[in-house]
Amino acid sequence: MTSDREHSPATYTADNSSENRFLQLIDSMPKVSVQGYDKSRKVIYWNQSSTDIYGYEKEEAIGKQLEDLIIPDEMREGVIYLHKEWVEKGIPIPSSELVLKHKDGKPIPVFSTHVMLKQNTDSPEMFCVDVDLSEQYIAREKLETIASTDILTGLPNRRYLEEALTKRISEAKRFDFEFAVFFIDLDMFKEINDTLGHTWGDQLLTSVANRMKLALREYDILARFGGDEFVLVIPRIDKPEEATIIANKLINIFKESFPLGSESVFITSSIGISLYPRDGSIPAELLKNADNAMYRAKESGRNRYHFFTHAIGEKLQRQREISAHLHHSLQKDEFELVYQPQFNMANHTICACEALLRWRPKDIELAVTPDIFIPIAERSDLIIRLGDWVLEKACAQISTWRTAGINIRIDVNVSGKQLEQANFFDKLEEKRNRYGLFPEDLGIELTEHTLIKSNELMLDGLKNQREKGMEISIDDFGTGYSSLNYLKLFPVTNLKIDRVFVADAPENELDGALLEAIVNVGHKLKLNIVVEGIESELQAQFCKNLDIDLAQGYWYCRPVSADDILALLKAGPGK
């Protein structure tokens, strides 16, 4: 026979003093809900914290079904099943972190533990002890927000993006739809950042982020990927043409200037687009292919967009293979310097030589020309290692020639990445000193682009070398920024005019006038003028008539070995 104490909720207002104190303790425990249920899951006990946490007064809860109070709809069947398994088979419900339901429907995170009393009677009682985790969840969400947000722009960061892409792929796979990923890179941002300073550079990034956000829909995902790179995910598209419309919209965002303090700055973007599932089935693949397409857009002239294609993928795979072979060849010393002499146009004597890098891998089929492997090397730090190799070999060759009584300068090409290294000029001095060379023995050639993006430290280093006597040339003048105004700003001694200005100058009046103007300005600035790409007697004579100082090209001599240079010098003046 079962007593009333085993049935009635009133049992738990005990008259026994110790039991009463225990119940008072349970009832007064903050943030710890204790509920009791009978074998049919009806509430038989409900402490004050249960009211505080779940919103039901004791009178509302007593006698109600557990699943009708705090169990979310999607958990009802599972909870009923677990309760039944415990009552009938003695399989306890494991402790776990759950999200239950408040009276008003809002989610309540708790850590829930379960105890069964009177398990071997006809009236077992299950008690749930739920510790409220709301504050921990709020703190966790804040930390998650901080961890997944870019501090500068307030946009989602790379971590958030990758998680969002994973979810989007799962949904797209389940419901069979496409979506688009846009990789957005700001053109020439580094130059703007170096010119205006990091504070204004950060302000520009924030302004760009805000303008893009305003142009997008609330459910589009715009994240800062890092540096001056952003990624946009359009959650669903029905056809690729929709991505084209969005890409044009993004390009147009940059048509208006961005105000920075009292100035306005214009900047453009290059955009690469990948589509799910066509261009990838995992986040890393979609991002990589969108990034690859973005580089194709940059190669095509910037301020444009490009869709990823398998041709791009194959090209980049080929470039990665070449890069790997270059690394291997550098370890094996499978490179060579050849030299193209520069001739004094007045007396046809050799005044200097440009050192040109050639790749001589053991497997001849791997070899490609410099116009292919140099740009690949420049995309990584490999260009720095190659540049160091060239400096070392050039200094060694100059030393060998000095020993043989040959006193001609060797000029080496220096990339922007080399010049950006804080220790570049220290390495230059160390190599010169080790081989017993003077500053005037070794010259360097820099492109317009490298000079224009040079920071103050780099320019100071160049000025210091110039004051010591080093020859500094602007290479391929006319193919970059082509502003004569820049010539007076940089510590250069020689202006090398690109072959495009020479090719048609003898027959084309406009080209001839342009070449003459460049030569005149260069001479006014006390620069030596070197023309590249002389391939005919007509071109050579035309340049000589303009009082150009030095000439270089196949008409005079192709790039040759160091031994061939010695033979040329012994032969005396040429054409």
Image: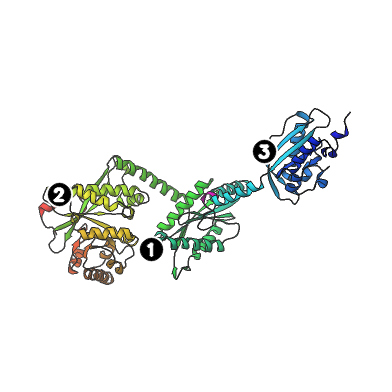
113 lies above or below 1 = below
- Residue 436 in the image, given as x and y percentages of width and height: 17, 49
Give the x, y percent position of residue 300: 41, 59
- Dot 1 lies on which element? helix
In the rendered image, the residue lying farthest to the right is: 1
Mark 3 or 2: the one toward you: 3
| Label 2, residues with CA under 10 Å away: few <14, some 14-19, many ≥20 | some
Q: Nearer the viewer, residue 107 or 531?
A: 107
Residue 533 visible in the picture: no
Mark nearer the viewer, 1 or 3: 3
Seen in the image, is 200 located left or right of residue 167? left
**Residue 99, visible in the rendered structure:** yes
Residue under numbered circle 1: 195
In the picture, measured across the screen, residue 344 lies left or right of residue 152, that is left
Q: Nearer the viewer, mark 1 or mark 2?
A: 1
Q: Which stretch appears magenta?
A: 156-160
Q: Describe residue 273's horizontal placement relative to residue 2 as left or right.
A: left
Out of 324 and 56, give the one closest to the viewer.
56
* The quadrant where residue 572 appears: bottom left
- Dominant secondary structure, magenta: helix
Q: Looking at this rendering, what residue extends furthest in the front direction?
A: 17
Q: CA distance from mark 1 to mark 3?
A: 57 Å
Q: Which is more N-terminal, label 2 or label 3?
A: 3
Figure colour scheme? rainbow
Classify mark 3: helix, strand or loop.
strand
Label 1 to label 2: alpha-carbon separation: 42 Å
Residue at the disc numbered 3: 96
Where in the figure is residue 530, as x and y percent of width and height? 22, 62
Mark linked to residue 401? 2
